[in-house]
Image: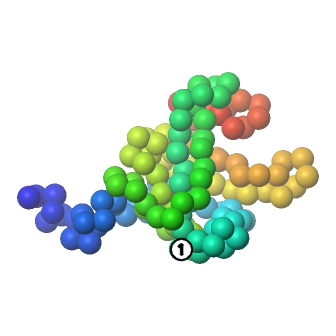
Amino acid sequence: MLADKMVPKNLVAAGFRVGDERLVRLTAQAATKVAALLQRQGRPQGVLRVAVMGGGCSGLQYKMDLQDGPANRDILVESAGVRVVVDPKSALYVTGSELDYSDQLESAGFKVHNPNAATTCSCGESFSA
């Protein structure tokens, strides 16, 4: 099979692909927070899943979750020492995005800086493409 020749055997068997930071990148602050959350959950080798779903006031919203590892068809990216997974459909919307984290009183939390977002809502948690 042609696809088997182009992708290393270990990735074909695992069912996921390896990407790079052109898909999604974490700032040092975001990586530190995610690593601490994974450690607290007892899964230091876990991954951060970044997904895009329908909803929110602008039509699309981000969903982030900590998981044990990549699922079938995921794209795995290592950024700032943290493993991030994105499903192929969400990858269409998040390519080129940067995930940041702030612990400032009025703007605490994760923020996605997405060059594909045509508009964002005032809360910053949803967007349209």
Please identify the residue farthest to the right as the structure is shown: 105
Quadrant in the rendering for residue 58? top right
> What residue is at 64 percent from the left and 47 percent from the top?
113
What's the residue at 60%, 50% (across, down)? 64
Q: Quadrant of the N terminus?
A: bottom left
Q: What residue does disc 1 label?
A: 45
Q: Secondary structure at mark 1?
A: loop
* CA neighbours of label 1 inside 10 A, class few (<14), some (14 to 19), many (20+): few
Q: Is residue 120 above or below residue 109?
A: above
Give left or right: position of 7 versus 31. left
Q: Between residue 87 and residue 19, name the one nearer to us.
A: 87
| Side of 20 relative to 16 (left or right) | right
Question: Which picture quadrant has residue 25?
Answer: bottom right
Location of residue 123 in the rendering, given as x and y in whole percent from the top left corner: 76, 35
| Near-viewer residue (14 or 101) | 14
Where's residue 24, x and y in %?
Answer: 52, 55
